[in-house]
Amino acid sequence: MTSEFNKLPADGAALLQRAEAVATAARDRGALQSIATAFETLEQDGIRYALRVVDNLRRKQAASAAQSADKPANPFLPYEPALYVAHVSPGHVLLLNKFNVIEPHLLLVTAGFESQRAPLSLADFEAAAQLNARLDGLLFYNGGGRAGASQPHKHLQWVPRALRPDVPGLPVDTVITPVLSQSRIQHVDALPFAHALQARAPTDTPAMDHARYCALLRAVSIDPDAADGVCENYNWLMTRRWMMVVPRTQERWDGMSVNALAFAGALLARDAAEATRIREAGPAAILSAVTRQAGVSGAP
């Protein structure tokens, strides 16, 4: 049985206060290693992308290399107690992302081992609903190695919708919101990458969201019920207003890892040289290059 401290706070403000208190203590102990960034905007085809440029991602890479040199490690089993925020359900814990660029950056992790190559389950959506009801942000999942998954243990992620500090919404909202349909799976022509998208409402149940997720996967020719239990190489994104699946063909563009946040409109460069290559290519070309170019199938 969880203690009172372990329970998820009843409202978003209290949850953010707890996350901030945990972050302060974890940072003081060296458990939370936030990554400072410089921010700029890249505007292309009606989307104002957020480009963050960092110079100390090597700290995360060095830690990963040290782990690999010893033996494969699972940072979530056991998780670092200093990064623990709450139990969302008996099967899911909420942690701080150890190497965060955005604050707060929360991880919704299965309490027991489940593979990041497995499809999202109804239990995952039930846990996600608890978080989504309290916090208006972006939930996302990097399904498999080609989708940018950095750990093999299943974890969903949450970040605030303000991926750009000057605008409260997601960069892609500017092209999604005006054409969002309540009745069908759709492809938004202004998004420069393969995807399937559908509107949702804050009151949608976990079962409704799970069914929508499965339909979106099928729309991009991914089987959520594969016999081997593997369902990978896609990114999943969900807000209170929409859900989207992006099929992936490769993890990297020109040596740079691309995960779900890029499809919400946030790109990350490890140094000035990478930032220059991103500016020269343009976000649209990068996102298109790492996705499978396929239309939405089965849409009315």
Image (cartoon, rainbow, N blue to C red):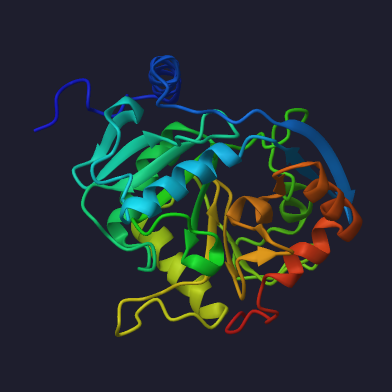
* Residue 237 against residue 184 in the figure, above or below: above
- Could you say which is closer to the camera, residue 202 or residue 249? 249
Whole-percent x and y of residue 165?
A: 73, 28
* Residue 243 against residue 43 in the figure, above or below: below
Q: Residue at x 32, y 56 (%)?
A: 72
Whole-percent x and y of residue 282?
A: 86, 57
Question: How many numbered discs sit on the rendered protein?
Answer: 0
Q: Residue at x 52, y 29 (%)?
A: 104
Task: State which quarter of the image contains the C terminus.
Answer: bottom right
- Could you say which is closer to the camera, residue 283 or residue 185? 283
Task: Determine the residue located farthest toward the front in the rendered image.
Answer: 69
* Residue 195 against residue 38 in the figure, above or below: below
Whole-percent x and y of residue 227?
A: 30, 85
Query: Can the viewer see residue 70 in this picture?
Result: yes
Q: Is residue 227 left or right of residue 20?
A: left
- Could you say which is closer to the camera, residue 222 or residue 189? 222
Task: State which quarter of the image contains the N terminus.
Answer: top left
Whole-percent x and y of residue 117?
A: 39, 68
Task: Determine the residue located farthest toward the left in the rendered image.
Answer: 1
The image quadrant of residue 18 is top left
Q: Residue at x 30, y 45 (%)?
A: 76
Query: Can the viewer see residue 205 in this picture?
Result: no
* Residue 207 against residue 54 in the figure, above or below: below
